[in-house]
Amino acid sequence: MGKVLDDTRSIKSKENIYNALLMSSLEQGAERITITYILKKAEISRSTFYRHFSSLDDVIQFKLQETVDQLFEFFKIKGKPHKSDKYLLLYPTLVFFRNRIDLLRLLINLKETDTLKQVLYSNLKQVNKKLLKAEKQVDVEDFYLENCSSSIVTLLVLWTKTGMSQSPEELSLAINNAKDITHKVFERFEL
């Protein structure tokens, strides 16, 4: 992952590199992205790139970790569930990512959505451990955390591919209603 350099210049360089990657993906397509092209777009030297990252995958990993960290901060500040969101995380996640459609499109173009699932899962697992230590929650099995991460990312990908035509409220309500209907069907289903 990106090397830890926190001074203002380093932070700006990392953002420039990410933005150049984003622009390169839009201009050239995912399969034609090169470090040389990104260096040119970011107006940085090769040594500056390698001071911060060891590969293009590191750039993506850096941006995803930063974004998911921001998402969890967003949960703390504004993450109160919408009245239609019985599942607590869905609505604030949709609101948060609505303004990050470029990142989602980049991940789709680069076929890196699994990386987002992994970063999201890792953060959910850390939160679960903290809640367990504070005795505020019962242990959530890894399977459920993985399933939650996978479901959220799959929904984000589908939502992005449809141009985010539904609002977070509409989508949360539709998902919650679908879960309620599925639950009612399975209650009546006998094995």
Image: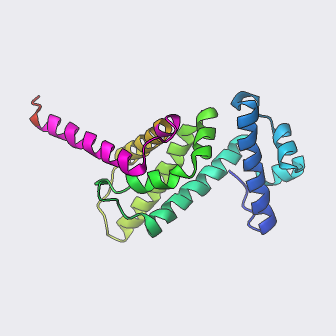
Is any part of residue 148 visible from this angle?
Answer: yes
Left-right relation of 22 to 163: right
Left-right relation of 128 to 186: right
Looking at the image, which residue is at 70% across and 47% down?
Answer: 59
Q: Nearer the viewer, residue 119 or 91?
A: 91
Compared to 32, does 1 lie above or below? below
Looking at the image, which residue is at 66% across and 45% down?
Answer: 60
Is any part of residue 54 visible from this angle?
Answer: no
Look at the image and say whether residue 29 sits in the magenta stretch.
no
Q: Nearer the viewer, residue 31 or 28?
A: 28
Compared to 95, does 143 lie above or below? above
Quadrant in which residue 133 is drawn = bottom left
Look at the image and say whether residue 165 sits in the magenta stretch.
yes
Looking at the image, which residue is at 58% across and 50% down?
Answer: 100
Image position, residue 102 (x, y; %): 62, 44
Left-right relation of 80 to 25: left
Span colored in magenta: 159-187
Quadrant in which residue 52 is drawn = bottom right
Assign the magenta stretch its main secondary structure: helix
Image position, residue 160 (x, y; %): 52, 39
Looking at the image, which residue is at 31% across and 47% down?
Answer: 173
Left-right relation of 123 to 132: right
Name the quarter where the C terminus is drawn: top left
Q: How is the image coloured?
A: rainbow
Image position, residue 45 (x, y; %): 90, 49
Image position, residue 16 (x, y; %): 77, 53
